[in-house]
Amino acid sequence: MKFFLFLGLFFVVVWLIRGGRRRGLPGSPPQAPAVPSDGGSEASSESIVACVHCGLHLPKSEAVSSAAGWFCGDAHRLAHDVAKPR
Ligand SMILES: [Zn+2]
């Protein structure tokens, strides 16, 4: 009979320790890793443009702008200008 008493006491102690640890970390909810870092949020908020020549989608900061639109690089901007001169 004493064995079951100690077993119950053991589970109560384990339950208290686990509860205490959960209460000890108030500023770290389980959803915290899902929030991207400042660098990731910058990339997601940046608008994406498509290259007029090949249709490649890339961030606006990496694209080359022209009167005809956005291009993935100077090579495609020049190729588009040669194919369709203004
Ligand atoms: Zn391109």
Image: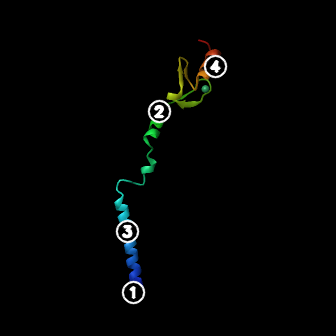
Residue at x 59% of width, y 20% of height: 77
| Mark 1 neighbour density, 10 Å: few (under 14) some (14–19) many (20 or more) | few
Q: Which mark is residue 2?
A: 1
Which residue type carries mark 4?
Ala
Residue 12 figure quarter: bottom left
- Dot 2 lies on which element? loop
Q: CA distance from mark 1 to mark 2?
A: 67 Å
The picture places residue 86, in percent across and down from the top left corner, at 59, 11
CB atoms at circles 2 and 3 under 8 Å apart?
no
Q: Which residue position holds label 3?
A: 17
CB atoms at circles 4 and 3 under 8 Å apart?
no
Which residue type carries mark 1?
Lys
Residue at x 50% of width, y 28% of height: 61
Q: CA distance from mark 1 to mark 4?
A: 88 Å
**Looking at this view, is 70 or 16 the one in front?**
16
Which residue type carries mark 3?
Ile
Which residue type carries mark 2?
Glu
Q: CA distance from mark 4 to mark 3?
A: 68 Å
Please give the count of numbered marks on the rendered protein: 4
Q: Which residue position holds label 4?
A: 79
Earlier-in-chain disc, 1 versus 2: 1
Q: Which residue position holds label 2?
A: 46
The picture places residue 35, in percent across and down from the top left corner, at 43, 46
